[in-house]
Image (spheres, rainbow, N blue to C red):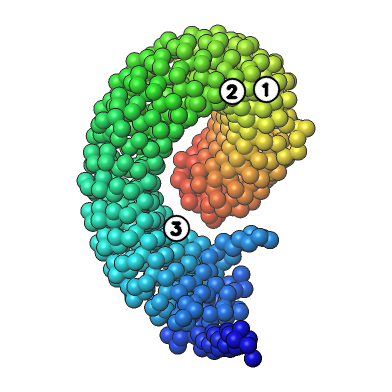
Amino acid sequence: MTKMGCQMLWLLLALTLMMATVSTGGSIVEECDPGDLKGLASFRGGIHMDTSGRLAKWVGRRCCRWQGVSCNNETGRVTEVHLPGFISTVDFVFQSQMEGWFSPSITLLTSLEVLDLGGLAGLSGRIPTSIGRLKNLRKLYLYGNKLRGSVPESIGKLLKLEELHLHENRLSGFLPPTLGCLKNLNALLLHSNRFTGSILASFSNLTNLMHLDLHANSLTGHIPQNIGDLQLLKELDLSDNLLNGEIPASVNNLTSISVMYLDANHLEGEIPFPSNYGQMPLLGFLRLQNNQLGGKIPPNLGYLVSLQRVSLENNKLEGAIPYSLGNLEALTELYLSGNKLSGVIPKSVGQLSHLILLTLSHNSIQGPLPNEMSALQNLQTLDLSFNSLTLNSIPRWVAELPSLSRIYLAGCGIKGQIPDMLKSTPSPIQELDLSANDLTGGIPAWMGSLTQLYSLNLSRNHLSSSIPASVADFQELGVLDLHSNNITGSMEHVFKIGTSFPGGSLTYVDLSDNSFTSGIQQISVGTLERVVYLNLSHNLQEGKLPTSMEKLKALQSLDLSYNKFGFGLVEALANLSHLETLKLQRNQFTGRIPAEFLNLKNLKDLDLSDNLLVGEIPAGKPLSDFPQSCFTGNTGLCGKPLSPCKS
């Protein structure tokens, strides 16, 4: 045999031995570690329903071959358990669910690095107090389940932990101080639980943290003064809690922050950032609404050149809108409603070329509106309602903005007739609110040509005449509010809206406080089957209620009070199973209260007073739960809650 042939032979022998070793080793590691096997078997035993079918395949002792289980090839120990509720493959997407108890024996898998049981929806129980045994754990996903109780102190022993996702459970109690020991943590998501107590100062030790989300809990106390130590933090969400005190000045040190949500708390004091140019250079999304912040909008806010969405609404901010906001060239949404802002809108607002939404309602801003706002070519939503603008008329440039589709100018002192220029806007109007102005004349016939209109509010004006037949041409109308005007005639055209579109779109109709004399008999069931709120009170309508009203299956609130309706109460009303409010007072209804009204199990607000009803009030809930005032003024009525009927 040649030297070359010998070398080839030895090489083949070596490869054969290597393959044999790997094969032998493979057979050894396939035998599950006893502790791991016990932990997995206990977990499986606690689950009584698995829609994915994965646990049904957990049979035998070779757990490293089980679906969702991964092992270390050398040690054979289980290192990862992946059983997420959301399953996505090349072929399909599936939302699975497991129901059962989270076995604490899962902590027997002491080599575990990743545990993913997120989004299973039905997994209940508690986070095991022995969770600290999993010292190799890097990622823990238990979100989107029904876990209860507190987060155990031993979680602070998971020093290798990088991601902790416990959000969307029913966890409660204080946050354990040991969370501050997890210095490798880069994502901490605890939102949408029931945690109480304060945010710990030890959180400032989590210097690798990039995502901190504690929103939708019941946390109290102050935001930690040293929150600015989290230099790598990109997203901070503390919204929807019970936090108070001032926003710490140290937030200026959050050089990586791009998202900061502190809204829906009880924060007070002034907005402390940025104090200098160049701070928080990446901040793009800022929410501070629904707090008690005071003082002025800081002019330095104009330094935050990356801002895209800013909400400061529903606070106690005062003074003028700073001119520097015009420097926010990337801004797309600006919410300033519900404050005490005064002065005029600065001309610099016209520089916000990317702005698509501007809301300034419920302030004390004065007119005139700057013509520079006509440069807002991308503006889609404009809300200037309830200020001190006294516009007298709608500026023509408003109707000429090429993208504007949602116009809210309620309480702006607009006078005269509804302007014709609104019928031919470049972008079809979808929402129009001109309520609480001094509009006169009638609803123009061209209004029906706004075929994409979804919401129309012309309430609290001085509109008169009758509703034009053209309103029946509305195709997408979902909200119609005409209350508190002087409109006369029939309301029948309203009940024909969308008749060419089965099912209709109307969900909210308020025609109250007018002088309508007829029309309810023409209710078209096909167009009102989605209506949730219907208010026809304080009008001059007469006659009998149509039996077709029983088809308004979605109706939750019906107010027909202060009219002249007569005859008996139609039993059809008892078929409105979702009804929560029924007001029929101050009419001329006669006869008995139908016994079928006892079927209105969801009824919470009832008023049948001041009619001509007689006989015994049907005994039982919900009628027996209402006070006497709901039935008084009907001299022929008796029975609980009124005086007993005479035998």
The amino acid at mark 3 is Glu
- x, y (%) of residue 243? 28, 46
- Per the rendering, the mark at residue 407 is none
Crowd rating for badge 1 (residues with CA inside 10 Å; few <14, some 14–19, many 20+)? many
Residue that sits furthest to the bottom in the current view: 1
Q: Residue at x 49, y 41 (%)?
A: 630
Crowd rating for badge 2 (residues with CA inside 10 Å; few <14, some 14–19, many 20+)? some
* Mark 2 vs 3, N-terminal side: 3
Relative horizontal placement of residue 305, taking residue 378 as reference (left or right): left
Q: CA gap, disc 2 to disc 1?
A: 15 Å
Q: Residue at x 73, y 25 (%)?
A: 473
Under circle 2, the secondary element is: loop
Q: Is residue 587 visible?
A: no
Crowd rating for badge 3 (residues with CA inside 10 Å; few <14, some 14–19, many 20+)? many
Residue that sits furthest to the front in the current view: 2
Q: Which residue is mark 3?
A: 168
- x, y (%) of residue 43? 48, 78
Of the residues tagged 2 and 3, which is closer to the observer?
2
Q: Is residue 86 above or below residue 276?
A: below
Q: Residue at x 61, y 70 (%)?
A: 52
Q: Residue at x 62, y 12 (%)?
A: 421
Residue that sits furthest to the right in the current view: 500
Q: Is residue 316 above or below residue 95?
A: above
Which quadrant is the N terminus positioned in? bottom right
- Per the rendering, the mark at residue 450 is 1
- Per the rendering, the mark at residue 403 is 2
Say which quarter of the image contains residue 62.
bottom right
Q: CA gap, disc 3 to disc 1?
A: 42 Å
